[in-house]
Amino acid sequence: MAWYEKWAAMAITAAIGVAGYYGIPWSRMDITIWAYWVGAVGAIGSIIGAYFLGERQSKAALRLAANVERLTAFRRGGSILAVTDAVESHTSRILKAFNDEGFYYLILLMQHDGKIMQSYIDALSAIPVHELGSYKSVAALLRIRTSMVYFQIHIEKCVAQAERSRNQYTGGVADFHRIDPSSIRHCGEEISVCNQTLRCEVEKLRVVEITV
């Protein structure tokens, strides 16, 4: 029961007591009338008690339902983060092949697998956006999806560029290729930043307290 509800109940009880004290002719009441009054007061007290008890149980049930929903959302968010964390880790490993002037093909070849990357994109696409619970989470996940698609496109272009140069070198494919890596790095940074935003939104479900 909230503090204002307690004060309201006390004020009502006091008002009824004062009105009863001054409005009832106590001196002219016999034992039968006293019995009636005691029974009436007891019945009224039982009704009031049942009302407040039912209200308290109703609030407890609402609080429990809200906490269960919050816990479910938190666990669901944890499952989503498992996917986005794997995506961020994968892109971070691939970015090790790049520096400010280009990329090392052999490192890229060891870290990149087109089928694995497509699997990550499919996993991101399978996440039910409507279950994320906040507009920030939705926006972050959609940006991760988009960045991952563009990241794949840029990486595939780098691989194709390296393959095209295969016949230009007697030693096989040249290891280092000069390109502007800013677009690829931007995609990787976008994935990392959005994943951090998504993590913060999920963590809010852990610490928020539901009050009813």
Image: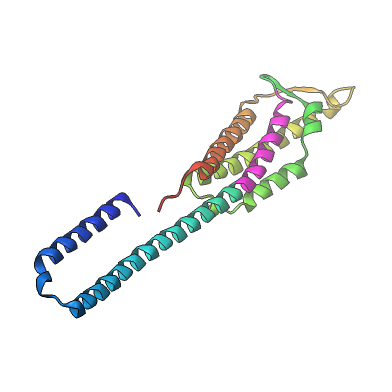
Is 183 situated above or below 74? Answer: above
- Left or right placement of residue 65 versus residue 125 in this view: left
The percent position of residue 210, horizontal first and vertical second, equals 45, 49
The answer to which image quadrant residue 35 occupies is bottom left
The percent position of residue 44, horizontal first and vertical second, equals 27, 71
Is 182 situated above or below 202? Answer: above
- Left or right placement of residue 143 versus residue 152 in this view: left
What predominant SS class does the magenta segment belong to? helix
What's the image's color scheme? rainbow
Q: Residue at x 50, y 50 (%)?
A: 133
Residue extending farthest right:
170
Residue 164 visible somewhere in the drawing: no
Question: Magenta residues?
Answer: 78-98
Q: Quadrant of the C terminus?
A: bottom left
Q: Residue at x 55, y 45 (%)?
A: 142
The answer to which image quadrant residue 95 occupies is top right
The percent position of residue 79, horizontal first and vertical second, equals 64, 48
Q: Residue at x 64, y 41 (%)?
A: 84
- Left or right placement of residue 93 versus residue 130 in this view: right
Of residue 194 and residue 177, the one placed in the foreground of this image is: 194
The percent position of residue 90, horizontal first and vertical second, equals 71, 36
90 within the magenta span: yes
Is 23 situated above or below 186? Answer: below
Q: Quadrant of the N terminus?
A: bottom left
